[in-house]
Amino acid sequence: MPAMTSLACRVQYVDDTDPFEYSANVPEPQRAPPVHSFSLTLPLINQLAGVYRVLRAPHRVSPSLPLSLSSPWRT
């Protein structure tokens, strides 16, 4: 059995904008989340820009998941 080198996942962002900020009463049509292939050999942080491009998310690119310097998850 060959080793997997990538993992295809559906990706989406949570639209947490203020729903009362907009005056339009027509909701955005639902669409299937896009699929993005993550490489299992590259660090996830290096792949986030590609996910952002696939999503065309309206939010700014910023560290959404900040880790403290003493976090055991930070390498």
Image (cartoon, rainbow, N blue to C red):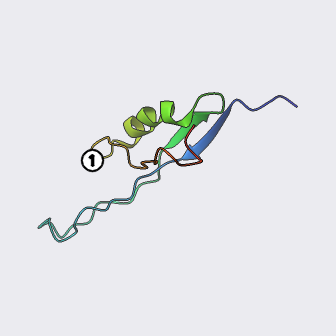
In the image, what residue occupies the spot 31% across and 40% down?
A: 61
Q: Residue 59, image x and y in percent?
A: 28, 48
Q: Amino acid at mark 1?
A: Pro
Against 54, residue 41 (above or below) is above
- For the C terminus, give its image quadrant: top right
Q: How many numbered discs sit on the rendered protein?
A: 1
Per the image, the residue denoted by label 1 is 58
In the image, what residue occupies the spot 27% across and 43% down?
A: 60
Q: Quadrant of residue 53?
A: top left
From the viewer's side, name the closer residue of 39 and 72.
Answer: 72
Q: What crowding class fits label 1: few (fewer than 14 Cα within 10 Å), some (14-19), or many (20 or more)?
A: few
Q: Residue 63, image x and y in percent?
A: 37, 44
- The outermost residue toward the right is 1
Q: Quadrant of residue 5?
A: top right
From the viewer's side, name the closer residue of 1 and 48.
Answer: 48
Q: Is residue 20 left or right of residue 57?
A: left
From the viewer's side, name the closer residue of 66 and 4.
Answer: 66
Against 57, residue 3 (above or below) is above
In the image, what residue occupies the spot 22% across and 69% down?
A: 19
Q: Residue 14, image x and y in percent?
A: 38, 58
Is disc 1 placed on a helix, strand or loop? loop
